[in-house]
Image: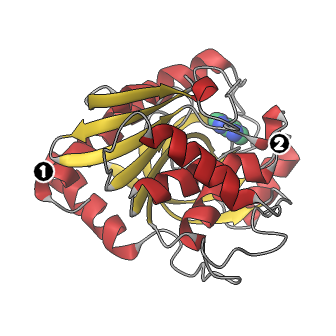
Amino acid sequence: MKEGFSSRVDDVVAAIRRVTDFVPHAAIVTGTGLGPVLDDIRLVARLAYADLPGFPVSTAPSHAGELLLGMLGDLPVVAQNGRFHLYEGWQGDDIVLPVYVMRALGAKSYVVTNAAGALNPDLRMGSAVLIQDHISFLGVHPLAGPNDDRLGLRFPDMSRAYDPDLRAAAASAADAEGVALERGIYAAVHGPEFETSAERRFLRMAGGDLVGMSTVLEVIAANHAGMRVLGFSAVTNNASGGPDQQPDTLEEVLENAAIGGDIIRRILLRMIREGTL
Ligand code: HPA
């Protein structure tokens, strides 16, 4: 991150603190088409990104640009409704700024959802997948540059990037809820173009089950900031790169994201009721 990054964080936190003293325990970030996951939050405060100094403003389709603070069941949360992607032209610092802001507000866990293509042909459209781990093909590393020791360690451990206890709790919440939750490894690509069929076969061979254009920079930052991460993908399209390759349209992505998003929402609400999130 660039010199002065933590004063960027401080400025945003100060602006939020002028509006509310609410302390969230968990941060939630929703991806393309997954905003409805946030419909159950009983709002305490709602802040437009445009009103937060130095905060980026999302341009991606179906990404509202606001920070929500409130109660999800008994859990105080801060939710980022709309996120930032490299393909929009943002820098790593812009993309991870909200992570450190939400950590500074009090959030100790970081729940991330995204829409992803299925590299693994066994994953059905509209299914919900618990992210086990990721592989970055982004070529961008958000912690490059001077490290601010107040924010995190110089060389953060990524061997448990997606918290094993939260993953186990999500799996048992899915069982209790009677919904199917698949497992997968998320491969992150820069975008905005979808991958060629040859690239998709390469990502599959490299060990990816899912492919998407988000999540990884934020998860690196959340680990750096000492947060426990839980990640879900909603499978929106076939990305197996085979001869039966589906055309990728935004409509297809949004429709399937809504189906997977509903499963993810039920799992999260169950985890909150069980006190595991
Ligand atoms: N590739 C990259 N990102 C995506 C995809 C995909 O197939 N589907 C949804 N986001």
The foreground one among 164 and 109 is: 109
The residue drawn where x is 53% and y is 72% is 161
Residue 3 placement, left or right of 148: right
Q: Quadrant of the N terminus?
A: bottom right
Q: Nearer the viewer, mark 1 or mark 2?
A: 1
- Crowd rating for badge 1 (residues with CA inside 10 Å; few <14, some 14–19, many 20+): some
**Mark 1 / mark 2, whichever is N-terminal:** 2
* Type of amino acid under label 1: Arg
Report the number of numbered marks: 2
Question: In this rendering, is residue 249 above or below 92?
Answer: above
The foreground one among 133 and 23 is: 23
Q: Which mark is residue 273?
A: 1
* Type of amino acid under label 2: Ser
- Crowd rating for badge 2 (residues with CA inside 10 Å; few <14, some 14–19, many 20+): some
Would you say residue 231 is visible in this rendering? no
> Which quadrant of the picture is home to ligand 1?
top right
